[in-house]
Amino acid sequence: MSSRRSSELSGRVAAVGLLVLGLGASVALHAEAATDTPDAAPAVAAPPPPPRSYPARAVADYERALDLARRGEVTEAELEFGQLAAAYPQFAGPQINIGLLRRKAGNLEAAEQALRLATERNPNSATAWTELGVTLRMLGRFEPAAEAHQRAIAVDPNHAAAHRNLGVVLDLYLDRPVEALAAFERYRDLGATDRQLSAWIAELKQRVARLQPPSAATEEGS
Amino acid sequence: MNRGRDITACLSLLLVVAALAAAPADAQRSRKPQTIGDLERRQIDVRPEARVPGSAARAMENYRKYLELQNADPATRAEALRRLGDLNLEAGELERMEQEVSAIDLAGAEAIKLYTMLLKAYPNYPRNDQVLYQLARAFETTGQPEQALATLDRIVREYPTVPQLSEVDFRRGEILFSAKRYAEAQSAYQRSLAAGETGPFYEQSLYKLGWSLFKQSLNEESLGPFTDVLDANLVDRRDPGRVLAIDSLKRADRELVEDTLRVLSITFSYLDGADSLSAFLDTREPAPRYAYLMYARLGDLYVEKQRYQDAANAYRAFVARDPNNDNAPLLAMQAIEAYRKGDFAQLVLDGKREYIERYNFASAFWQGRDRAKLPQVVAELKTNIKDVATYYHATAQTSKKIDDYAVAARWYRDYLASFPDDPDSAATNYLLGETLYESRQYADAASEYEKTAYGYPKNERSAAAGYASLVAFQKERERLSGEAQAAWHLRQIDAGIKFAATFPEHPDSGGVITRAAQDVFALQDLPRAIDVAQRVLAHQPAVDVPKQRIAWNIIGEANFQLGVYDQAEAGYLRARDLVPANDPLRKDLTERLAASVYRQAEAKRSAGDGLAAVEDFLRVAAVAPDSGIRATAEYDAAAQLVLLKEWGRAITVFENYRRSYPKDPRQPEVTRNLAVAYAEANRPADAAVEFERIAETTTEDPALRREALQSAADLFDKAGNVPKTRATLERFVQRYPTPVPEAIETRQRLADIAGRSGDAAAQLNWYREIVKADAAAGAARRDRTRLLAARAQLALAAPPRDAFRAIRLVAPLKRSLEQKRKALDLALQAYRAAVDYRVADVTTAASFEMAELYRVLGADLLKSERPKGLGAEAQEQYDLLLEEQAFPFEEQAISLHEINAARAREGLYDEWVERSFAALAGLKPARYGKTEMVQDVVTSLE
């Protein structure tokens, strides 16, 4: 009686074992099919940037971390920036650099996380927003990317890079040439002197003109 | 008064002398008379008053000196003479008594001379009656009875009024009786009796009167006087209703009474015995209360004469006459004794039965009587009941008849009812048990034996009785059936236990308690079986080894059945220790021992104490290495270890199991378990071998085999054994082409392995297989198969692409371009096939590749080898021509890349789309060369 039970038992054990082994494979498959999580809606209104004053100690530590980053000592640099971020949660810089280091290493999701945190630490950092926008574009999430650049612009309308970056997303990835053209033009107006810029603007104008009826072109221009 | 004493003394002396003279030897004989003749020599013992011999001699000398004085007063001289004669007579008596002489006493002769002298000298001396009496005495003393009688006769004649006349007549009767002149003696005694009952010689006279009549053969006449003697001695004068006990009488009276009874008995025996006695008594009014003595003595006499029936009749006559007389039981008893002496067995028995009937404690006899005051009657009753019971018991033993035993049993019961507290009752109760047993009343026998064993103070038969009760219990049980038998059996068991507890020293005590334990166990009263078995073990003196073994076995079995397996184990272990090595029982006990350990393990397992369960399972092998269950136990230990995820230990046990029991039917399970255990213990290589074994076991479930083969492959892979991984997977694909999706996955793995191994040909081969399988799958086709097939197809496109790229455009261009175009077509065809799967990432990749094919062709055309010998102008012309040729390819490339890039806006943004963007940035910089402005680091703290 008991031996029969035992054998049933062991049969079950074996089956469980096989199941466990099979499960490993299916987990692997699942990882391949991982899906993106939906993007959080960006905050709308940004408070006016407060006057910034930096603690000397923080500045010194930041410099050291930046040196590490420049020398390519990525891991040490990220650790340093992490400590700074913890010590000075009011500053976005350390967190932005963590995001940049990760993005450079190809770890886009982790980079996005860090940069989002940066925007939370300091929502008035246009740099944080626009670097987030670039990262989101790399991740193929073009609309959120555009919105991030727009947040940067909202925070700092004179942030040139944000205008240019917005222009790239709108033009290449969202096929919104009219807006792209405006962005590039704003970029140009902020004093940009890129050699290709005039070519980019010319090409866009051409395409916009081609796309739009002549009557509408004046509206677009205004 | 003084004189009377003197005469008495003389008479006594006379009789003594007469007795000595007649038969000196008789003095030494028993005092009890044996014959009538003996009786005749008996005398009435009249004691002389004590005198002081010294003072008598002195007085005699004084008187003699006084008489020698001649001047004395005549009266005083006569008195002195008489006193001197008396003293001489007495001195002669004393001397004779001392010397026992028969010669005529000189002092006596002196006395005769003095008295005769006195009578002659003083014929009127007023006390001559006394002188005559003294003279008669002196004559008697000196052996001259005739002169004595003549002298006494002279007193009667000359002094007829003397108050001592009855004494004188008595003396005359005595002399006449001695002379055998019985009629004259009779007369003399009768004269003496005339003085009345108060006279000092009354009883003696009556007695001798009886004798005188008897001597004249006047038997019936003698009865009256004799009986009067008894009346005079035995009837209490103050309380005539009371009989004096013979023993309470003075010796002389006692002897008189005894002699009288004796002669009466003889007399009745001469007549018609008891009938005559009864008839005589009827004439006496009131009937003497001592009649029983008369019957008793008559009976005694008959016994002496060995006339036992007459004796018994005599005794019984009284019993019949006065059955409730105090003495009647004694006579009844004597009657029985007489029968016994006469060897009248039946009469003895009848007598005893009659006795029991008359004198049992319920009889009229005992009304108002106290048993304690009649111990003899009680003792006799006891003896008789017992004798009767014994008789019937003996009879039954001879006849072997059940009814006879039943009768004996009834008598034993009577005995016990009458004498429950008798010292003998235990023994009798035992006998009652025996008779009941023999009469097959086994239940009653058991009960009585038990009473004997336990109801009395312990004695040497107690244990035997206890044991006998067990035998009776057994007999009764054999007789019974059904529920009655079952109930009886329970009682029998109780009896056995009680017996062993009470009589441990009995040689069968150990056996009995052991048997009880077995029976209780057989009845499945398990807790009690354990208890009784423990009694067996505690028994002192200790039971022998086989019984100890039985007890331990019962403890083991009972505990096992009760589920108390640790106790069961202990019991079996002890039992086994007591079995010789070569005994077949040993094997059985080993099995049970193993089972009890096994059950402990099971219990612990059920209770959730898995590790402890394992210890017990493994302990089976330790305590019972030869047991049949050992394999199962080891297996279960290992299985439990698997459950506990104790992989290392589980592996050890299973490996041992595999070695120890190679033919065991559980080997497939062992393999399965080992497979899992090895896998879990991170021994993938070993696990893989086990899974492979499962997969190759044809008796296994096909689904399991398939799964096992796959697991084997996984584990070989994990173990880094590439050849085995490949081989196993190949076997899998070959053996299990369906279900298609899994087979395709496996091919994919094979392709991957080949790729990692650098075996490009094999990899491509598996890709082809994937494409083929997917295409042929029909309804079994899945998104996943399509994905894999698409990727395979994409991979299959790489070789034609590379072949296309490898073709250099050299002069003559036409020919090499032709080759390259063909190669282009092949590559495009392959990529289109990939696109056809409509798998997003494959589509983007294939699109990119196709775009690049065109771009490369365009670029290669521009870079193609120029024909030799062209002039500068021709060269320019040629270049323009090439550009024209290349342009459409470039346009085609841009177009395809743009299609790919446009996918980004559809949400498809992968590596290939990105790369298309990058390509477009090169092909159309103004349109696609726009780049973001990014920073490597942010230097502001922000």
Image (tube, coloured by chain):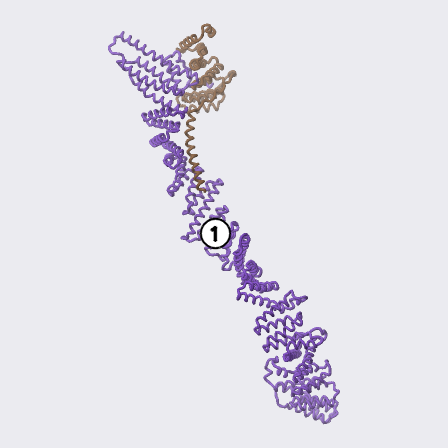
Q: Quadrant of residue B38?
A: bottom right
Q: Residue furthest left?
A: B869
* Image quadrant containing the N terminus of chain B: bottom right
B443 and B450: which one is in front? B443
- Res. B611 in view: yes
| Mark 1 Cα shell of 10 Å, populated few (<14), some (14-19), many (≥20) | many
Residue B818 placed where, x, y %? 29, 15
Q: Quadrant of residue B259?
A: bottom right
Residue indicated by mark 1: B552
Chain of the residue under the numbered disc 1 shown in the image: B
On screen, residue B455 versus residue B804, left or right, reads right
* Secondary structure state at the residue bearing disc 1: helix
Number of marks? 1
Relative to B423, is B749 above or below?
A: above
Relative to B197, is B549 above or below?
A: above
B741 and A81: which one is in front? B741
Rendered purple, the chain in question is B
A199 and A52: which one is in front? A199
Residue B422 placed where, x, y %? 60, 64
Residue B62 placed where, x, y %? 69, 89
On screen, residue B468 versus residue B376, left or right, reads left
On screen, residue B148 versus residue B656, left or right, reads right
Q: Quadrant of residue B707?
A: top left
Residue B356 placed where, x, y %? 62, 67
Colour in which chain A is shown? brown
- Res. B50 in view: no
- The kind of residue on which mark 1 rests is Trp
Relative to B823, is A219 above or below?
A: above
